[in-house]
Image (spheres, rainbow, N blue to C red):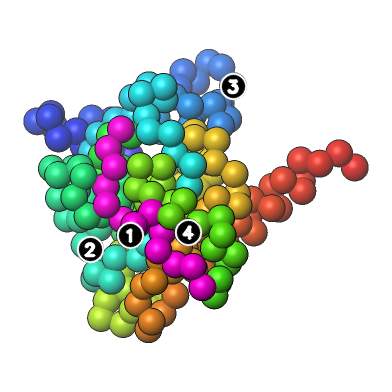
Amino acid sequence: MLVCLLAGSLPLAAQTVSPSGPAPSLETLARMSGTPDIPGLNMVWLVPWGDRADANIWHNIVVHQTEGPAGSAYRGALQQARHPERQGTTIWVETDGTVYWAVGEWATPKHVRLGGNRNDNKFIDNRDTFRLTPNDNSIGIEFAGNYPNVRKPVTEAQIEAWRILVRVLQARYGIPTERIFAHNWVDYKDRRYCEGCMLATMARAQGAEIALQGQPH
């Protein structure tokens, strides 16, 4: 797995843990700084993680789809890295499952309208989201590949990456499962399809299953 730092001239290898000790848990890796090598994720770091204390206080995860072609995630992430607070998201996911971490955890890319402008309760109860999911507390993820057909589903590789990535985000920032949203759930968006809905639903189901497994029997 490679780490591509904008300020560096050469890619750097992801940080690995000494083989002499037990493998760290996903939760431990999620709380590290730098560029941890997270099993199951092909993560390309355009910027490394800093100290969690310096990150934005992320309360929500908002899942997007770029309506861009396969192969466009890296270009989108690179543009985001150059202009961290332009329209876009912190994380971009390619159709092959490669995850690009594009900007520092302090940045607030523009990806939600007016703090969440949907209030019709069409998909979820919007009393919990209307004007309550602004860019400065909602971390966004873009999934590439649904062009020219916006209804084209995400790939299996993207799904597998997402299953791990969402757990990392929840562990790193303490985001509960009920604060994972599809873009269409919080914003009035494209009427042709429900942007991010399948991925957000999947993440919530996974979170509920993990919570159930953790309950005493």
Position of residue 167 measured from the top left corner of the image (x, y, whole percent): 54, 44
* Residue furthest left as drawn: 9
Residue at the disc numbered 2: 71
Residue at the disc numbered 3: 22
The mark closer to the camera, 2 or 4, is: 4
Could you tell which of marks 4 and 3 lies nearer the N-terminus?
3
- Image vertical order of residue 95 relative to residue 11, above or below: below
Regarding residue 81, the answer to whether it shows in the image is yes
- Magenta highlight range: 106-120
Element type at marker 2?
loop
| Dot label at residue 56 | none
> What residue appears at the point 64 percent right and 50 percent down from the top-left corner?
207
Residue at the disc numbered 1: 113
Could you tell which of marks 2 and 3 lies nearer the N-terminus?
3
Position of residue 179 measured from the top left corner of the image (x, y, whole percent): 55, 50
Residue at the disc numbered 4: 130
Element type at marker 1?
loop
Task: Please tell me how crowded label 2 is: few (under 14), some (14-19), or many (20+) other residues with Cα within 10 Å.
Answer: some
Whole-angstrom CA distance, mark 1 to mark 3, is: 44 Å
> What residue appears at the point 76 percent right and 40 percent down from the top-left corner?
214
The quadrant where residue 34 appears: top left
Position of residue 121 measured from the top left corner of the image (x, y, whole percent): 56, 71
Task: Please tell me how crowded label 1 is: few (under 14), some (14-19), or many (20+) other residues with Cα within 10 Å.
Answer: some
Q: Are marks 4 and 1 in contact (CB under 8 Å)?
A: no
